[in-house]
């Protein structure tokens, strides 16, 4: 009789390593936006399947740990793809293939007017990021992960490793940086600006300004 503790993983789970290798290979060899997106989607599917398998076999610690590791690998590939999508989108804006914020973001300039990029290969126009229907939320997520990684190289790997070392399931939420808090206005700089403006005023203008403040009860 087979010991349940050493029950092999479900047959479908055995395909996950191959899925991850395929996603990593696709991302590493990608020369078009479509291929980067394909790598991201492959990795996302592998991560979701690993999470599902781990929850289905929660009582089997060895299977759960293996699925957590696979999910962590998948999330790291997915994060790399998201960062690259953000990079390529920003590069497309700089090349003029995508208008800057506030414009028609789907306007494409003919490729002969631009340097070759991820959307162009061998003089032929390929699918560019705007053509592929990327949402602004996805671009924002990719930029957030990329910027956090730039500030702290290895951040994504570290977060995943910490989760695995603690026996916890790595998640997208853990990888996604928290929203940046808006910085409060620098009161010192604002005060210096006001002082500078005051010093530029004539005596007559200063008198009128003080009269106005007194009429409003702001000063006595």
Image: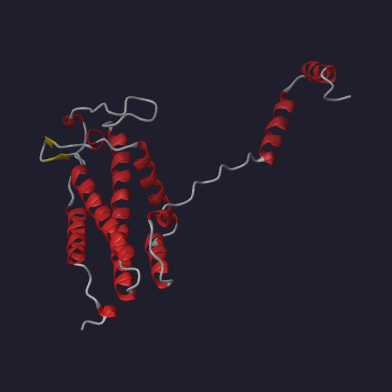
The tally of labels here is 0
Query: Residue 184: horizontal and vertical position, in percent?
Result: 62, 41
Q: Can the viewer see residue 73 in this picture?
A: no
Give the residue at x 34% y 74%.
61
181 or 14: nearer the viewer? 14
Query: Residue 145: horizontal and vertical position, in percent?
Result: 39, 51
Quadrant in the rendering for residue 66: bottom left
Q: Can the viewer see residue 3 in this picture?
A: yes
Quadrant in the rendering for residue 86: top left
Give the residue at x 21% y 58%.
24
Coloration mode: secondary structure
Along the horizontal axis of the image, is 29 left or right of 66? Answer: left
Query: Residue 116: horizontal and vertical position, in percent?
Result: 19, 39
Residue lying furthest right: 220
209 or 128: nearer the viewer? 128
Q: Which quadrant: the N terminus?
A: bottom left
Query: Is residue 8 depicted above or below 71 in this figure?
Result: below
Along the horizontal axis of the image, is 167 left or right of 80? Answer: right
Query: Is residue 208 depicted above or below 91 in this figure?
Result: above
Residue lying furthest front: 1
Along the horizontal axis of the image, is 219 left or right of 115? Answer: right
Query: Is residue 171 depicted above or below 125 in this figure?
Result: below
Query: Is residue 72 depicted above or below 119 in this figure?
Result: below
Give the residue at x 20% y 56%.
23
Q: Which quadrant: the C terminus?
A: top right
Along the horizontal axis of the image, is 19 left or right of 153? Answer: left
Query: Residue 42: horizontal and vertical position, in percent?
Result: 22, 53
């Amino acid at each position: 009789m087979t010991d349940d503790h050493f029950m092999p993983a479900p047959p479908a789970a055995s395909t996950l390593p191959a899925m991850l290798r395929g996603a990593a290979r696709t991302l590493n060899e990608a020369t078009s936006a479509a291929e980067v997106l394909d790598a991201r989607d492959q990795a996302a599917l592998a991560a979701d399947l690993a999470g599902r398998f781990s929850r289905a076999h929660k009582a089997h610690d060895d299977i759960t740990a293996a699925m957590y590791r696979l999910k962590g690998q998948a999330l790291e590939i997915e994060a790399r793809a998201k960062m690259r999508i953000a990079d390529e989108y920003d590069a497309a804006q700089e090349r003029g293939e995508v208008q800057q914020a506030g414009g028609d973001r789907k306007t494409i300039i003919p490729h002969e007017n631009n340097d070759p990029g991820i959307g162009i290969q061998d003089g032929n126009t390929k699918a560019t990021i705007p053509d592929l229907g990327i949402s602004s939320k996805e671009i924002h997520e990719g930029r957030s992960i990329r910027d956090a990684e730039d500030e702290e190289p290895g951040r994504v790997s570290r977060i995943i490793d910490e989760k695995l070392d603690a026996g916890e399931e790595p998640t997208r939420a853990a990888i996604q940086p928290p929203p940046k808090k808006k910085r409060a206005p620098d009161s010192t700089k604002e005060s210096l600006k006001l002082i500078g403006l005051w010093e530029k005023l004539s005596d007559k203008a200063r008198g009128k300004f003080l009269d106005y403040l007194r009429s409003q009860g702001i000063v006595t």
